Image (spheres, rainbow, N blue to C red):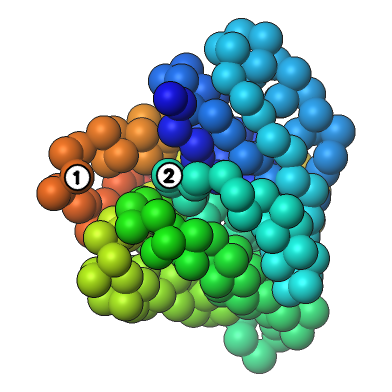
């Protein structure tokens, strides 16, 4: 029987690449995001190309009751892998100039949204006595950099929560991993710079960034390890990037 992966933020970037990777490997999928049209297109492509079952769940991870009610509807399913991927950076300002609305959006999505989804899925895994939770962290959860303030804080929270989840779920045999990437070329910078295409493009100029497929490959790989093996944390960077602030551009 096929396994099932539940991916938050599958409409773009890393989440979408994970959807392809797991579908190619015969997983059924629950794909989520706010952009329903994109989810519908993805579902029809994946079902056609890979002959897997794809369930679409449209919700904003910030809406606590919607997250709960939506996931409640699929409670009879077995979720083998949860990829907590939905997240974003919004704005890049020094702390004294930051937009409080941007801060709220990052904290509500990256931290509280991840918690709401985990709070609904982890009891299902406890009941099953198996499961694997993969949190998409960031280099921003390991270091801070100028004007990264609240985004970095939110990803430091993901880093801490990954460790905390592993401790709490230990007795239930559930694996908990974090993948913490450096620069990956996705829609991330368009969102961060509020659709300023020129600034977003400049982030990836002069070096070869990671591709979202690189992260999907890692996510899939760590699920293929024998059940007694858990990868706690992977920090993965473009070869041209040594830290959050050290990057060689040619
Ligand atoms: P994208 O912008 O391409 O994708 C982000 C995904 O998150 C989209 O599918 C979006 O779906 C979803 N999302 C955002 N906000 C919400 C919300 N409120 N509710 C539900 N879904 C939401 O960026 P990436 O693929 O790069 O980002 C994925 C993750 O990777 C994020 O957690 C990001 O912080 C992390 N990351 C990215 C790096 C990079 O350099 N790109 C590096 C390190 C980590 P929709 O808009 O349809 O709701
Ligand atoms: C995204 C990578 O360096 O912009 O998490 O924080 S970075």
Q: Quadrant of the C terminus?
A: top left
Residue that label 1 marks: 227
Q: Nearer the viewer, residue 68 or 8?
A: 68
In the rendered image, which quarter is residue 246 located in? bottom left
The residue pinned by badge 2 equals: 80
Q: Nearer the viewer, residue 147 or 115?
A: 115
Instruction: Name the residue at 73% across, 73% down.
Output: 64
- Picture layout, residue 224 above or below residue 159: above
Q: Is residue 39 visible?
A: yes
Q: Residue 55: give x, y in percent of width and height.
A: 69, 35
Badge 1 density bin: few <14, some 14–19, many ≥20, Cα 10 Å:
few
Q: Position of residue 185 (x, y in %)?
A: 54, 38
Residue 18 location in percent, x, y?
A: 50, 34
Which residue is found at the position 86% from the left and 33% from the top?
37
Q: Quadrant of the N terminus?
A: top left
* Residue at the (64%, 18%) spot, across then down: 46
SS of the residue at dot 2?
loop
């Amino acid at each position: 029987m096929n396994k099932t992966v539940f991916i938050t933020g599958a409409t773009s970037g890393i989440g979408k690449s994970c959807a392809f990777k797991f579908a190619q490997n015969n997983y059924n999928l629950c794909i989520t995001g706010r952009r329903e049209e994109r989810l519908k297109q993805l579902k029809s492509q994946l079902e056609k190309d890979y002959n897997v079952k794809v369930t679409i769940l449209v919700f904003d991870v910030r809406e606590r009751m919607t997250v709960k009610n939506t996931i409640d509807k699929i409670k009879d399913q077995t979720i083998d892998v949860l990829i907590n991927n939905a997240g974003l950076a919004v704005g890049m300002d020094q702390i004294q100039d930051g937009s409080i609305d941007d801060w709220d959006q990052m904290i509500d999505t990256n931290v509280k949204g991840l918690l709401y989804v985990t709070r609904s899925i982890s009891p299902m895994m406890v009941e099953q006595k198996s499961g694997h939770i993969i949190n998409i962290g960031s280099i921003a959860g390991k270091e801070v950099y100028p004007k990264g303030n609240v985004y970095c804080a939110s990803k430091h929270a993901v880093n801490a929560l990954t460790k905390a989840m592993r401790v709490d779920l230990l007795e239930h045999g559930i694996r908990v991993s974090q993948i913490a990437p450096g620069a990956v070329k996705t829609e991330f910078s368009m969102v961060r710079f509020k659709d300023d295409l020129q600034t977003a493009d400049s982030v990836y100029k002069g070096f070869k960034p990671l591709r979202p497929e690189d992260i999907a490959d890692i996510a899939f790989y760590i699920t293929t390890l024998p059940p007694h093996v858990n990868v706690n944390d992977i920090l993965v960077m473009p070869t041209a990037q040594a830290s959050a602030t050290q990057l060689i551009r040619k």
